[in-house]
Amino acid sequence: MQKQRLHKIIARCGISSRRKAERLIMSGRVMVNNRTVKKLGTTVDPDRDKIYVDGRLLHLDKYKKYYYLAYKPRLMLTTLSDPGARPTVADLLKAHNIKIKLFPVGRLDWDAEGLILFTNDGELANRITHPRTHIPKTYLVKIRGAPDADELKLIRNGLRINKRTKYLPAPVKVIRRVRNYTIIKIILYEGKQNQIKKMFGYLGYPVLQIKRVAIGPLKLKNLAPGKIRPLTPSEKRKLLSAGLKD
């Protein structure tokens, strides 16, 4: 087999994302053929070289990738552990007796709900979250008040909220207007922290609720809060090919 970059191989094994694999290498936790490797960019032959992470031998040929779609409820952290013992998405895995070592891809705020992806495919996770791929994430957002057409146009054209922060253009559509709130569908192509809250807050419309309904080709559809299921073969094919070209 042709030589490949070490951090990519570690990510494909599901040990971590590609970025975290780089940190594992730099911290001296990776060995190749009984030799500690700390240099980024190191290439290895997976068919001939033996790779260890924290003393554990990796077996690429025997490793299987898993992909699950879940509905994260509100008031739950998108992490696998919390020192404060708050609910985390790891509780979803436990509730469904899923014992495979998986990690969530991307993030949803504590008070947001909706679709998240679990996998042990570190390279896929990196590609989905990396800014250059621009995988669309679709949200339904409930805001207080009623923005007009000109204000929504600012979001569609790429909203700048200060000298340092400008967001990419985001398609936005009013779904329903009620007397004191509006339901809006918005598609983001980047994953900046608290982006939706900051955009609508800048325009003067507090966000009351956020629900993610899609990541690329994956749709939440009728999945109930707190439920989790494996991707269908069709969903898996679409996910692996959606915007994942270098």
Image: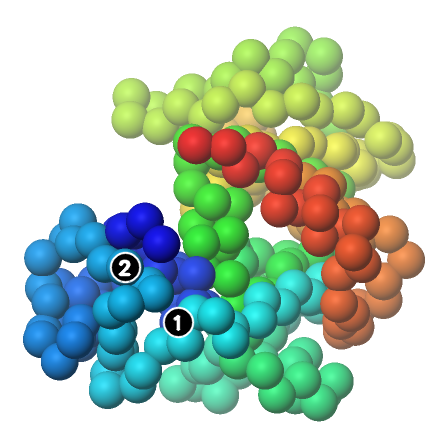
Is residue 35 visible in the rendered image? The answer is: yes
* Label 2 sits on residue: 45
63 with respect to 224 (left or right): left
Q: Earlier in the sequence, mark 2 or mark 1?
A: 1
Q: Residues within 10 Å of mark 2 (few under 14, many from 20)?
A: some
**Nearest the eye: 37 or 184:** 37
**Residue 216's x, y, as percent?**
67, 40
Is residue 154 visible in the rendered image? The answer is: no
Q: Amino acid at mark 2?
A: Asp
- 137 is higher (above) or lower (below) than 62: above
* Label 1 sits on residue: 15
Q: Residue at x 63, y 60 (%)?
A: 117
Q: Quadrant of the C terminus?
A: top left
**Nearest the eye: 58 or 130:** 58
Proximity of marks 2 and 1: CB atoms separated by less than 8 Å: no
**Residue 105's x, y, as percent?**
53, 58
- 180 is higher (above) or lower (below) than 41: above
Q: Amino acid at mark 1?
A: Ile
Q: Quadrant of the N terminus?
A: bottom left
